[in-house]
Image (cartoon, helix red, strand yellow):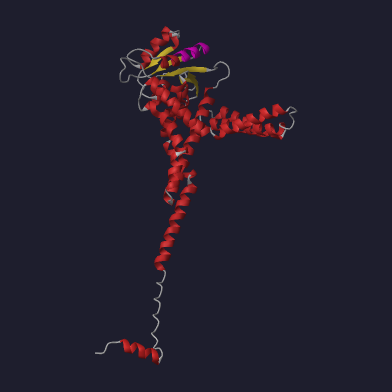
């Protein structure tokens, strides 16, 4: 019975976070805690029930399943590096070579190098400073990798909705670029999701947000509105916002068009982009929920890395404070090493010099020896 207590506590923690602070990384952390408690409970039940299974071949199958699960968990970093590298190559073949499209490939190669080549090179250089720098780099990689995992889990939590939306007053569809006047499929999926929400919420206003950028003949909002009206949007409840140039301006300028500024707002974007838009809406004091549209897997993987980098840049001051606090043991280790080395130099410099060893006095020897030595000296 007590085995289920941690899971119930983790589930209650996740429910509280979803209710009061869903638009944060705490939602992903709460889901991670729940996953870990379920995994530990499953492992304990697996071990406890092994002896209760009467059939030998069933016990053998269970044992192999447990070993396979343990092997996958142990090899997860390597599998992640291989997966990111393969998906990065696939993205470059499908979408072409560009700096933005190289993120997943670069991340995969870095993970593989960090697990294999970098530790080997650090072991060859037997130097305390190099070892400390390697420990510092590994700690930073671990910090941002764990935060990336929490970020992805938080994005998943904010995309899960039960039932149809209720109480929506406005729906904001974020732009993502057009070609001349044509709406690309990625943006079309966003608008289609917004139209669906408009049909489910009969009192909500659909706001299509996007200004005019390079290579665009008209503002995105205008092109998005024309596309939406052609695909079933309600003309009496559809308006365009045509001045914004980024996500924050999308939300800030759209808020000026809200029929109910304090009402509930739905933010529609591609799934990998929803969480960062929600974090910005929280900073703008908007009561908002997020809805995501579909995109290809290989493109979403690379785009999620890009969104995480944008999130780190957006919260860079907080990131630096948290990272410095977590790296306190390394700073103390480096400081202790400097103090010890400096104290050794001072003790070596302040030590009294060793007095010279006195030269032994020559003995005169016996008369016979003096006679022999004297006979060897040449006479003047």
Residue drawn at the location 45% of the way across and 43% of the way down: 120
Q: Is residue 250 above or below residue 139?
A: above
The magenta span reads 191-201
Q: Quadrant of residue 276?
A: top left
Left or right: 198, with 45 as reference point:
left
Left/right placement of residue 104 relative to residue 212 reads: right
Residue 199 in the image: above or below residue 114: above
- Whether residue 199 is in magenta: the answer is yes
Q: Horizontal placement of 79 versus 62: left or right?
A: left
Q: In which quarter of the image is residue 162?
A: top right
Locate residue 44, reporting x and y percent. 67, 34
Image position, residue 218 (x, y; %): 32, 15
| Position in image of residue 220 (x %, y %) | 36, 16
Q: Position of residue 117 (x, y in %)?
A: 44, 39
243 vs 112, left or right, is left
Q: Which of 186 and 222 is in front in this view?
A: 186
Q: What residue is drawn where x is 39% and y is 91%?
A: 368
Please report the residue visible at 40 percent of the width from the left and 87 percent of the height from the top: 363
Q: Which of 119 and 213 is in front in this view?
A: 119
Q: Is residue 238 visible?
A: yes
Splitting the image into 4 quarters, where does residue 210 fall? top left
């Amino acid at each position: 019975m007590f085995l289920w207590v941690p899971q119930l506590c983790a589930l209650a923690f996740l429910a509280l976070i979803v209710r009061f602070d869903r638009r944060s990384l705490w939602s992903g952390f709460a889901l991670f805690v729940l996953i870990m408690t379920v995994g530990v409970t499953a492992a304990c039940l697996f071990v406890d029930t092994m002896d209760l299974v009467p059939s030998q071949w069933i016990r053998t199958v269970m044992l192999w399943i447990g070993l396979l699960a343990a092997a996958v968990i142990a090899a997860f970093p390597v599998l992640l590096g291989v997966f990111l590298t393969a998906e990065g190559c696939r993205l470059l073949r499908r979408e072409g070579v560009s700096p933005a499209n190289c993120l997943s490939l670069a991340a995969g190669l870095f993970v593989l190098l960090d697990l294999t080549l970098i530790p080997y090179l650090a072991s060859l250089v037997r130097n305390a400073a190099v070892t400390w720098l390697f420990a510092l780099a590994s700690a930073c990689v671990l910090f941002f990798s764990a935060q990336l995992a929490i970020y992805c889990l938080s994005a998943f939590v904010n995309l899960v909705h039960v039932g149809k939306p209720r109480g929506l007053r406005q729906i904001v569809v974020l732009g993502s670029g057009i070609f001349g006047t044509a709406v690309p499929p990625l943006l079309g999926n966003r608008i289609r999701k917004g139209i669906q929400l408009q049909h489910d919420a009969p009192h909500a206003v659909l706001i299509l947000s996007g200004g005019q950028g390079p290579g665009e003949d008209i503002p995105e909002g205008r092109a998005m509105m024309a596309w939406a009206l052609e695909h079933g949007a309600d003309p009496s409840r559809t308006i365009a916002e045509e001045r914004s140039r980024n996500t924050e301006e999308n939300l800030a300028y759209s808020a000026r068009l809200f029929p109910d500024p304090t009402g509930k707002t739905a933010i529609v974007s591609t799934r990998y982009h929803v969480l960062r838009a929600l974090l910005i809406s929280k900073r703008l004091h908007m009561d908002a929920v997020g809805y995501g549209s579909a995109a290809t897997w290989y493109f979403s993987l690379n785009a999620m890395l890009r969104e995480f980098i944008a999130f780190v840049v957006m919260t860079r001051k907080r990131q630096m404070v948290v990272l410095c606090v977590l790296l306190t043991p390394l700073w103390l280790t480096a400081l202790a090493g400097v103090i010890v080395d400096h104290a050794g130099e001072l003790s070596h410099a302040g030590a009294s010099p060793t007095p010279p060893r006195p030269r032994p006095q020559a003995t005169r020897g016996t008369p016979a020896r003096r006679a022999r030595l004297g006979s060897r000296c040449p006479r003047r």
